[in-house]
Amino acid sequence: MLKKTIITLMMSAACLLSQAEPLSVLKLDRSLQDSTVIYPESVETNTNKMMHNWYLSTYAQLDSLADYRESVSAPDEVIVERLGKLPYVIEMPFNSLVRGVINMYTQRKRSLVENMLGMSHYYNPIFEAALEKEQMPLELKYLPVIESALNPDAVSRAGATGLWQFMTPTARGLGLEINSVVDERRDPVKSSEMAAKYLKQLYEIYNDWSLAIAAYNCGPGNVNKALRRAGEGKKDFWDIYPFLPAETRGYVPCFIGACYVMNYHNEHNIAPALTKKPIITDTIHVNKRVHFKQIADVLQIPVEEIRALNPQYRQDIIPGNIRPYSLVLPSQQVYAYLMSEDSIVSHDATLYNRRSRVEPSDGSQISVTSDGKYMITEKTQYHKVQRGETLSSIARKYGVTVSSLRNANGIRSVRRGQTIKVVTVQRTLREDIEETSKPDENESVTADDANSADSLNDGAGITVDPAAEEVEEKPQPKAEPQKKQKIKTESKQSGPVYVKVRRGDSLSKIAKRNHTTVSKLRQLNGLKNDNIQAGQSLRVK
């Protein structure tokens, strides 16, 4: 019995619904409440965070008394009259949903409206230019108010990005570029141009602005589905209202409320952010890869200013080497950029340029030290033993001694496939002491002096090409001028000299007998300490 009763009630309700006229804005009761409506994410914008926006902090002067101004309300009849006076093509009907949006903007979100009014000084001319180009109603410039709260960097929970909140597939379908470096959804000019074209396409489909605006929010698929569920006949947004997604049901009322508050904010005691000084910009095309920091450093302008004017560049990089990209600058800086472009591109180029070619490291390490007179360059590299190679052939290949290879690796022989360490050392005369190291004109140049550079060749692979020293004689007092004579020493290549360690010898004794130093003996023989054994051969020259 209960089951039959429920079925009867459902059939009666269906019959009543089929006989009822479609809902329209004129039929909606002003007391209508819809608790399922979801307002756009823009109304949740953190106004304190907005104050860090470069434009607001630099060019706008907020009213310090805004928080203390009393909120002024208006009766429904006044709001209906004001909406009717707006010189717009798109209808601006009134109902309880619109009233709720207006109350939200004029009471709880007063500071948000104040900030958006300040941002509109910069963005509205861009929006109007794009809409004019497509011959679209100029009141559509208030769509970004409810889409992004005029924040070009806004990203929704669903991933919609930019002033006009484009999803990636829609944006790419319209021709906007999106990659790791560039996101043209954030470009105020290009995204506005594409938004105007997209809205034009939607209006051509539905021939009704309320449906076109709804489709902009939820997509044509959802609007078409709602139209089918609403039945035959000409429909507008309010006819298909119950069949739309919850957020879209609040979207058109939010648009109407935004249009109202952006025009009648003064009537509700909301003070707009006033412009302290105008910002006049110009656009140039860049065909070189350049980083914002390079521009900021050379032109002496804040990098935050460049970011605010060019939010489409996600990594502060303009990839002009791929194709020409636009760069927006304050008009007085455009000529400075054009004149300084080469300096900008070369500034810290190694820091910001991408490497086009690179070779993998071979594992070698180079260290440079000084012993006072000579610069000592020590290079450590690694060699993989090939078929038929011996310690002797490897030593010849790198210009080192067999003993140095043995000492560096702690081995007596090598096998194929083994990797061994090769240490080569080179000493060069320091340029800063070369002049002071020349012999005095009263001193004779001995053969030992001429061959002193040769004594620096060691078994670790030193290749020394000693430069010939020149001694210039000064003219003697009260004597006829003499031609300057040059004493030139020729380097002589001598073979290595070895001594055998005797019982009771130490490195210091051997160094003293052979007129050298302990440190040089260590270097010549690859010794890590002073331990030596009787019968061991040591190289001393």
Image (cartoon, rainbow, N blue to C red):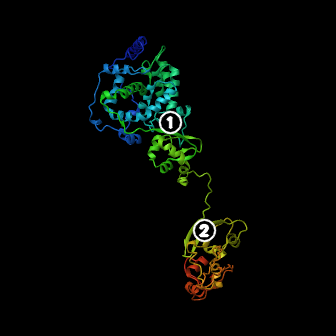
User: For the residue marked with disc 1, what is the amino acid?
Assistant: Arg
Query: Quick check: 526 left or right of 295?
Result: right
Residue of label 2: 379
Please tell me the numbered disc located at residue 185: 1
Assign the N terminus to one quadrant of the image: top left
Q: Is residue 480 above or below residue 147?
A: below
Horizontal relation, residue 466 to residue 215: left or right: right
Callout 2: SS: strand
Q: In x, y percent, where is residue 413?
A: 67, 73
Relative depth, front residue between 132 and 453: 132
Dot 1: what SS?
Answer: helix
At which x and y percent is residue 247?
42, 28
Q: Residue at x 72, y 66 (%)?
A: 387
Q: Is residue 344 visible?
A: yes
Amino acid marked by disc 2: Lys
Q: Position of residue 53 (x, y in %)?
A: 40, 41
State which quarter of the image contains the C terminus.
Answer: bottom right
Asked if 314 appears above or below 428 in the picture, the reply is above
Residue drawn at x 59%, y 41% is 323
Marks 2 and 1, how far apart in space? 53 Å
Q: Residue furthest right?
A: 388
N-terminal of the pair, mark 2 or mark 1, is 1
The extreme top residue here reads 19
Nearer to the camera, 247 or 174:
174
Q: Position of residue 228 (x, y in %)?
A: 49, 18
- The crowd level at tag 1 (other Cα within 10 Å; few <14, some 14-19, many 20+) is many
Q: Is residue 104 visible?
A: no
